[in-house]
Amino acid sequence: MKHPRNLPSAKLEDVSWDIRLCPSEMLAQLGDSSWDLIVFTTMLLSIPSATGPMLLVSVSVIALDIIRRLVRSKRERKGSHLPPGPTPIPLLGNALSVDIEEPWKTYTEWKAVYGEVIYARLLDQEVVILNSQSVAVELLEKRSQIYSDRPVIATVEPYGMGCNFAIERYGDQWRLCRRIFHQTFRTDAALTFRPMQLCRARQMIVNMIDEPDQYASHYSTFAAAVAMPAVYDYEPNPRNDPMVHIIDSFLRASVPAMTSEKALLLKLFPFLLHIPDWFPGSSLKRQARTSYDWAVKMVETPYQYVQKRMITSNQPILSMVSDHLDRIKKYDEPYRSHYTTALKHASASAIIADGGQTTSAMLTFTLAMVGNPHVWKRAQAEIDTVVGVDRFPDFDDRPSLPYVDAILRETTRWQPPVPLGPHATTSSDTYKGFISPKAWATVVANIWAMSRDEARYQNAEQFVPERFLTAEGALTDDNPSGFIFGFGRRLCPERHTADASLWSAIAMMLATLEFTLAKDAGGENIVFESTYVNGATRQPATFPCCISPRSHINKESLQRGFSV
Ligand code: HEM
């Protein structure tokens, strides 16, 4: 195994006694790595065109790197080691080795070389990667007082993502958002959503029978139709709803930019946000502005809708926002403003996550069904036996439909909607002889690596729901919800509602629809390579497929609530 040679950025007090060493002692402490520095310095000094500022920058880079290495050697002499990781280069650290599109895959490859806990540096950002569920539980859950902050991501504010409390730093504002959120989506409240979830799922099937090619849009509408009534008392139109359009537009503009790894570009070149529109390279600034404008609409439009209805409607408005708007009146400034911001952020977070994660899982489900027709056929046989063909599945049937649940588990295991759970530390920590860096280090739960653990999931790249069934056909104890919803105090607060939404959508689709490859004009199957749109969440890009109703299903029966 390679030995780590990188160090966190240093505070001067950390190295005060070290810099009293003479240069030869310093080089001796640096060991082999000193040769890199000597070679690098010699190369720079030998460039004939090297100007004063260039030399100054180069010498600063080298000095910084020497300080990093001295701090590490001091720590190691004290018996504490940073976790192993790939060799960094000066200034950039390991940034060039990481696949910016799919960093979780790089981190998973590193696991084979460096193990379950890895240390890397992306520019000046120290990152500890946790590649197994057990280590993530050990640190992010059992030591959650240290590991519950979020890293600062340079793209958050320019892209308008500050309205999402999932990215909020650990503190009072986050606590208030989470409390507001919890009151609406806590486990017992989530149970009351179930009839509504089944009804929305049935409405979605009607839309899919009418316009099967628009399946992605029907999924977004379904997701919004679950969250928006609870948050804003707003019922989206079954199709082409203006609020759903705003959410979709914001997600399309912002999500791809929302990872620490992608934010590196802005961190390296912050001036990219300030160059004129006509200047080459201004596309990033324009993307950010578009995303920001959609964010403002997404936060304000439904919020103002509730405020207006509270004045004009004769009926009581029952929603998260109206409930808290009533409570806010009791407070004076400045707490009133603080509460208002938290309410706007909590409500926007609900619709962002529903539009992102729930839709992602439903698209992945469809992709898996088109590629594995034997799976939906087996599920239909199970549903027909347990439920029959004269009604639709409901939550009372769930315990008797283990194969449907196995499909749901495999969908989120196969392609986790959120592949990385980035946390940040608020103080230093030691774990199994490794020291985690000081405060504000990023600590990433690599959910992707957990889903690819070959010891637990053989042939992990394949979609095999049977892996969650015993030989007798019952569900096993292995539930990927133990990692796909994250860890500790930042664990997904919506996991129960999300699980029920997905179950109602998937069970209803399996009971009523068939999924096959689309055909071209000559009647040949259209075979396609699936691709994913990657960001803080990931979801399949839309693909050609044929979704059609089963022979005994028609729209009228769906609207009545019976299948025949
Ligand atoms: C399949 C569906 C979903 C998956 C896989 C998922 C997964 C996750 C993950 C991995 C995290 C980060 C946890 C961590 O940092 O350790 C998270 C956080 C969060 N999720 Fe979900 N989620 C889903 C659905 C939803 C839905 C539908 C909502 C809201 C309606 C939601 C709201 C949130 C919020 C607000 C946070 C941030 C919590 C915090 O930072 O305190 N999620 N989710």
Image (cartoon, helix red, strand yellow):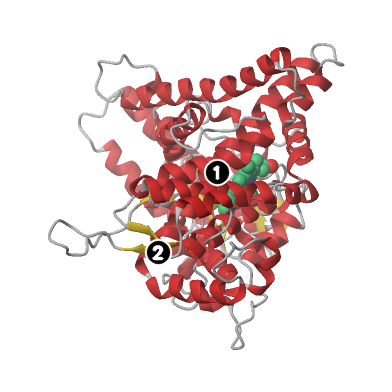
Judging from the image, what secondary structure is the residue with disc 2 in? strand
The three-letter code of the residue at mark 1 reads: Ala
Whether residue 13 is visible to the viewer of this picture, yes or no, is: yes
Q: Secondary structure at mark 1?
A: helix
- List the residue tagged with mark 1: 223
Q: Position of residue 1 (x, y in %)?
A: 48, 71
Q: Earlier in the sequence, mark 2 or mark 1?
A: 1
Question: Horizontal placement of 267 versus 485: left or right?
Answer: left
Above/below status of 522 relative to 382: above
Instruction: Return the residue found at the far right.
Output: 330
Residue at coordinates 55% horizontally, 43% vertically from top-left? Answer: 223
Could you tell me which residue is drawn at 66 percent across and 25 percent down? 344
The answer to whether residue 32 is seen in the rendering is no
Q: Nearer the viewer, residue 428 or 539?
A: 539
Residue 291: horizontal and vertical position, in percent?
44, 26
**Hey, which quadrant is residue 277 in on the image?**
top left
Front-most of 232 and 30? 232
* Residue designated by label 2: 514
Identified by mark 2, the residue type is Glu
Residue 470 horizontal/vertical position (percent) = 61, 84
Q: In the image, is the residue at mark 1 within 8 Å of ligand 1 by its beta carbon?
A: yes
Whether label 2 touches label 1, CB < 8 Å: no
Look at discs 2 and 1 and give the one toward the viewer: 2
